[in-house]
Image (cartoon, grey):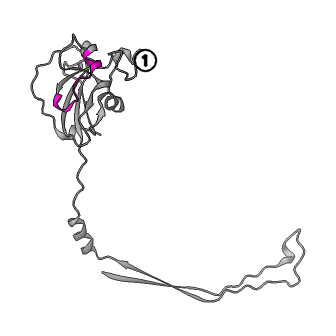
Amino acid sequence: MGSLQLHSYRLASQFNQNANNIHNYKPFKSSSTHLSFSRAKIRASATVPDNTSNQSQANNTAQPEEPPHVNFAFVHSVLLPDGTPDIHYRSACGGQKLRDIMLDANIDLYGPYSRVLLNCAGGGTCATCMVEVIQGRELLSPRTDKEKEKLNRKPKNWRLACQTTVGNPDSTGLVVIQQLPEWKGHEWKYEEVQVPAQEFSQ
C-alpha cells in the first residue's frame, strides 16, 4: 500500500483597479488598490491502496444472502392465443395478505369487479376476490369464519385473497394461484409445478 502526499501553495497576487474607468462611482483617493495574500502551505495526506489488496478484499467479501421470500405463479383465467396458460411470476415477503401481494404486483384480482364500489376493498364481505390455490396450501393461513361463510359451497382450495395470509416473514416456498376461478377457461390437473428460480421478480 502506497502513500500519497499533496503540497499546495497560495501564491502572492496583486489586484489593480482603475477607479476612473468605472462609471457612476466616485474615484478613489489613489488610482490603484494593492491587495496581497500571505504565502501558506497546505499539506494533505491520503492512502492509495494497491490493486492486489483490492482484488484480495473483493475475493474475500461474501455475497449477502437474499432475505426469505415466497415465490408465486399467478395463472390468468384467460388462455393465451396459442392455448397455453398466461402465467405471471412474482416474489414477495411472507406475512402479508394475498390480496395486498396481488395488487402490489399488478395482478388482476377482481376482474369485472375492480371498479370502485363493486368490491368491499378487503373487508371480506363481497367474495369477489376469490382465488383457487393450485399449490402451496401449506403456506397459507387457515380459512377464516368469513371464508367459511362465503365459500361454503365452493371447493376447499378456493380462498378469499383478502382473508388469506401468506406464511410469516421467514417463510419460503412456491404458491401457485389461479386468478378469477369462476371465469377460467381451462381445468387444472393437480400435480406439482416446478418453476425456474430466474422467472420470479420482486
- Location of the C terminus by quadrant is top left
Check the image and report above or below for 52 versus 34.
Answer: above
Which residue lies most toward the top here?
A: 153
Where residue 43 appears, as percent x and y from the top left, is 49, 85
Magenta stretch: includes residue 146? yes
Which residue lies most toward the front here?
A: 145
Tally the marks. 1
**Residue sitting at 34 percent across and 17 percent down?**
111
**Residue sitting at 32 percent across and 76 percent down?**
49
Check the image and report above or below for 123 versus 68.
Answer: above
Magenta stretch: includes residue 202? no
**Residue sitting at 84 percent across and 72 percent down?**
22
Please tell me which residue lies in front, 104 or 23. 104
**Residue sitting at 24 percent across and 41 percent down?**
69
Which residue lies most toward the left here?
A: 191
Read off the magenta span.
137-148
Relative to residue 38, is residue 168 drawn left or right? left
Q: Callout 1: helix, strand or loop?
A: loop
Check the image and report above or below for 93 versus 97.
Answer: below
Relative to residue 125, is residue 54 drawn left or right? left
Where residue 5 appears, as percent x and y from the top left, is 43, 84
Where residue 130 appears, as percent x and y from the top left, is 28, 18
Q: Amino acid at mark 1?
A: Arg
Q: Which residue in the protein does label 1 denote?
A: 115
Relative to residue 65, is residue 188 drawn left or right? left
- Location of the N terminus by quadrant is bottom left
Categorize mark 1 by other alpha carbons within 10 Å: few (<14), some (14-19), many (20+).
Answer: few
Residue 55, located in which quarter of the rendered image? Answer: bottom left
Where residue 169 appears, as percent x and y from the top left, is 26, 41
Residue 150, located in which quarter of the rendered image? Answer: top left
